[in-house]
Amino acid sequence: MSAAQARQSGNTTYLELSQESGGAHKFYEVTVEGTTVSVRYGRIGVDGQRQTSAFPTVEKANVAAAKKIAEKVRKGYAPAVQGQRAARPVTHRQVTSAPSTARATAPVLWRFRTGASAFGIHVDEDRCWVGNQHGSVYNLSHDGEVLAHYSLPDGVKCLVADDFWIYAGCDDGRVYDLSSKVPFAAYEIAAEVDIFWLDIHAGVLNVSDRNGGLTVIDHEDELQWSRNSSGDNAWMVRADDHAVYHGHSRGVTAYAADGTSQLWHTATNGNVLFGWQEENAVYAGTGRRVVQRLAKSDGRIEASYACDAAVYSCATSPGGRYVFAGDSASSVYCFTADGTRLWKLGTGGGSALSMQYHDERLYIVSTDGSLACIDASEAAINAAQSGTVPVAADIKLAAALPTYAPLTTAASVATVSAVPAPGSGVVVECTQEGGRVRVHVVSEGYEPSWNVQFPRAIRQPGARYVVDALHSSVGGFYRVRGEIRRLV
């Protein structure tokens, strides 16, 4: 079939590529309006990404559009009617949660109920973050005060941080940057990838998926490399300067950071359900009731931490001095580095699906959708084991809590008419380069060759924007901090 035979509605051509084997399931749409060519693409059933290009004449715009369509037809895309083919269901982690068999309950200081099952958690020096299956992300203080609410388009699978940037991986296949006042989609995962877990290191996104695949994408949302490990259901991915550690149904596999080679593979005692990392080791929680510590250098198993039920989550205190685990029976554990169990306590709620330790507190998100803060100090744990626990504060939402939704179009951005005074904002410009819209800094004092990680929904060739601030990142690019305004 030629490109000219592709079905059109007015000046719009809509194509789909769907493989019965469970591979690609995506669409590609081209619209010509005068000298402007607009492209929309992504997973079938979602709105997708948009790109717009301007050409000097109508004829050149039509030629460019025909070329784009022909390229997709050669790759197997075919004409389709939008809406007739349904979106593939996204895999949600199927978990069970039994009552705890522990004799005592953990000393929970406060508990915040998000309203839906939650996997996403991140804790830093200033804030606690939790994201749930309704697409809600909440930002709380360490004392449990709810500070902000982000409303994302789909369920949150996990929250990950890169320096002081915070990202939410969602079921719509996008990764949203929550670091600025208004969130935006920073990465779009390949349409055929059913995301299970994410990690970001130095601006590079690492994605593990249902089929046991590993996909690595740079800050400009461009594929760097991908590999298929020997197992499936890859619930673990962690990355550092040297390697990417991929946990799946047959163990943990380490790949060189540039994807050129497999460094090692270690068969774990059971399928990997969660992963954690420290400087010299990775930790794999498995379905066979154990957390195993693997040396990053060669994958050897250095220690094991035995639990009484399948391990849903794990974490460590700094340097791996203490190892924590959450099981499918609503219990949390603490071990010494060598594997000695110090305590086992009930959560007082559901099973911990994710966890993180910070400053003698263990933060968990559970099957009942709660974020709970547990006092993990020695004194509090000793008191809990003897039956004395505090009354957990039940955190409520403030009536005037601000809610932030992602930028979706250029029209949703506020405009300004004057170039900001020095020190009050940074001007960036969108340019067309090699078929892609790139964003570079126009203001002085920045490296002009570096790109800016910028919302794709508002990228338009020739458009200029003012941002509050830019920060340089490892890898040679800039990230936005603060509000984005269009300069007209």
Image: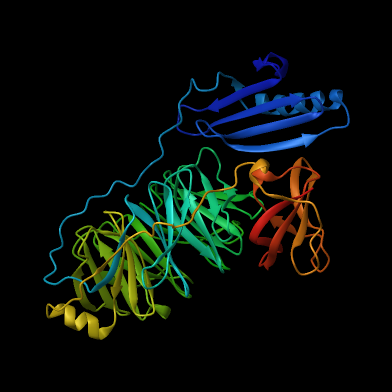
Position of 176 compared to 295: left or right?
right
Position of 305 compared to 68: left or right?
left
> Residue 454, how many percent across, how many down?
67, 53
Quarter containing the N terminus: top right
Q: In which quarter of the image is residue 194?
A: top left
Q: Could you tell me which residue is drawn at 49 percent across and 20 percent down?
A: 84
Q: Could you tell me which residue is drawn at 15 percent across and 58 percent down?
A: 99
Taking depth in this image into account, of 333 and 137 the one nearest to the observer is 137
> Residue 444, how many percent across, how many down?
83, 66
Taking depth in this image into account, of 334 and 346 the one nearest to the observer is 346
Taking depth in this image into account, of 286 and 329 the one nearest to the observer is 329
Residue at the right extreme of this rendering:
56
> Residue 268, how many percent across, how many down?
33, 61
Q: In which quarter of the image is residue 143?
A: bottom left
Q: From the viewer's perspective, is residue 124 above or below residue 70?
A: below
Q: Could you tell me which residue is drawn at 54 percent across and 57 percent down?
A: 178
Q: From the viewer's perspective, is residue 193 above or below residue 285?
A: above
Q: Could you tell me which residue is drawn at 64 percent across and 33 percent down?
A: 40
Q: Quadrant of residue 103?
A: bottom left
Position of 150 compared to 343: left or right?
right
Query: Can residue 245 be seen from the camera position used here?
Result: no
> Residue 206, how many percent across, how many down?
53, 55
Query: Can residue 106 be seen from the camera position used here?
Result: yes
Q: Which colour scheme is used?
A: rainbow
